[in-house]
Image: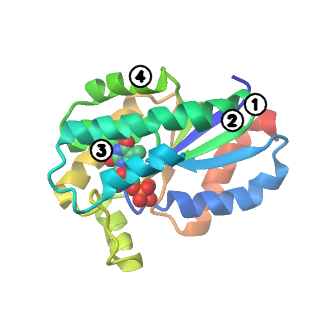
């Protein structure tokens, strides 16, 4: 495909979406092609409806496999309806979370197995992989305490999980980083905001040479 696909990953509260906004304010005007920003779970009408089911704190009885399949179902719709057409038309696509979130949260966090979750996601996406993944690396305690400060009454079902769950997610990300080291670049999200923005800008200036 002609475009370039970038996913952003990391624990809750790592600051991905805020950093991306600032990065695009700096880099966006320099891009030769159009770009698209999207997010998961969600990014299309049907996928956003599935998102509401997954993240609703009232859905306490949801079992782990249902959760994994719903994320994959939302992703499938998002890929076919939004991501693939954008890439085919040559756009640079930024997705706030993609398959690695499922590997870390459902594979490692829910103990369903990284390889098993990879398989159902290959089915869902038809094997589409990002060209580049930015992994916002931040200790889970730090991320969660940021969320509690920023929006104390609005935690979603996943954010409400115990710290042990978030530790497993964090370790899952480290495993995924080792496994796919050629695709994933680690961003030190414990730095101050401007430093994180600058690190991301410099990685993108290098990787997006053909688009700048
Ligand atoms: P969201 O509010 O988008 O979180 P963030 O702003 O941190 O990206 O909610 C997404 C939540 O869903 C987040 O806790 C991570 C989780 N998640 C999974 O468990 N598996 C997945 O495949 C995806 C995409 C997200």
- In the rendered image, is residue 129 in sight? yes
**Crowd band around label 2 with a 10 angstrom C-alpha radius: few (<14), some (14–19), many (20+):** many
The alpha-carbon separation of the residues under discs 1 and 4 comes to: 23 Å
Mark whose residue sits in front, 3 or 4? 4
Give the mark nearest the N terminus, 1 or 4: 1
Q: Quadrant of the N terminus?
A: top right
**In this picture, is 66 found above or below 58?**
above
**Residue at which label 2 appears:** 86
Q: How is the image coloured?
A: rainbow
Q: Residue at horizontal 18%, vertical 37%?
A: 111
Q: Residue at horizontal 74%, vertical 25%?
A: 2
Mark whose residue sits in front, 2 or 3? 2
The alpha-carbon separation of the residues under discs 3 and 4 comes to: 16 Å
- Dot 1 and dot 2 residues touching (CB under 8 Å): yes
Q: Position of residue 201 (x, y in %)?
A: 68, 52
The alpha-carbon separation of the residues under discs 4 and 2 comes to: 19 Å
Q: Nearer the viewer, residue 119 or 85?
A: 85
Q: Nearer the viewer, residue 74 or 141?
A: 74
Residue 122, disc: 4
**Residue at which label 1 appears:** 89
- Secondary structure category for the residue under label 1: loop
Q: Residue at horizontal 19%, vertical 41%?
A: 64
Residue 105, disc: 3
């Amino acid at each position: 495909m002609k475009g370039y696909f970038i996913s952003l990953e990391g624990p809750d509260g790592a600051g991905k979406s805020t950093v991306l906004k600032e990065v695009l304010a700096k880099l966006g005007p320099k891009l030769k092609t159009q770009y698209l920003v999207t997010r998961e779970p969600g990014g299309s009408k049907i996928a956003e409806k599935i998102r509401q089911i997954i993240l609703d704190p009232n859905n306490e009885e949801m079992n782990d496999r249902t959760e994994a399949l719903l994320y994959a179902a939302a992703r499938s719709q998002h890929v076919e309806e939004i991501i693939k057409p954008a890439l085919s038309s040559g756009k640079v696509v930024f997705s706030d979370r993609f398959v690695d979130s499922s590997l870390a949260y459902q594979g490692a966090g829910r103990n369903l197995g990284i390889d098993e979750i990879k398989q159902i996601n290959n089915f869902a996406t038809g094997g589409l992989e990002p060209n580049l993944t930015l992994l916002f690396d931040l200790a889970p305690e730090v991320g969660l305490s940021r969320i509690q400060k920023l929006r104390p009454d609005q935690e979603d079902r996943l954010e409400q999980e115990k710290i042990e769950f978030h530790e497993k997610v964090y370790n899952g990300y480290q495993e995924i980083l080792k496994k796919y080291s050629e695709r994933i670049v680690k961003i030190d999200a414990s730095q101050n905001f401007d430093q994180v923005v600058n690190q991301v800008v410099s990685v993108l200036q290098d990787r997006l040479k053909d688009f700048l």
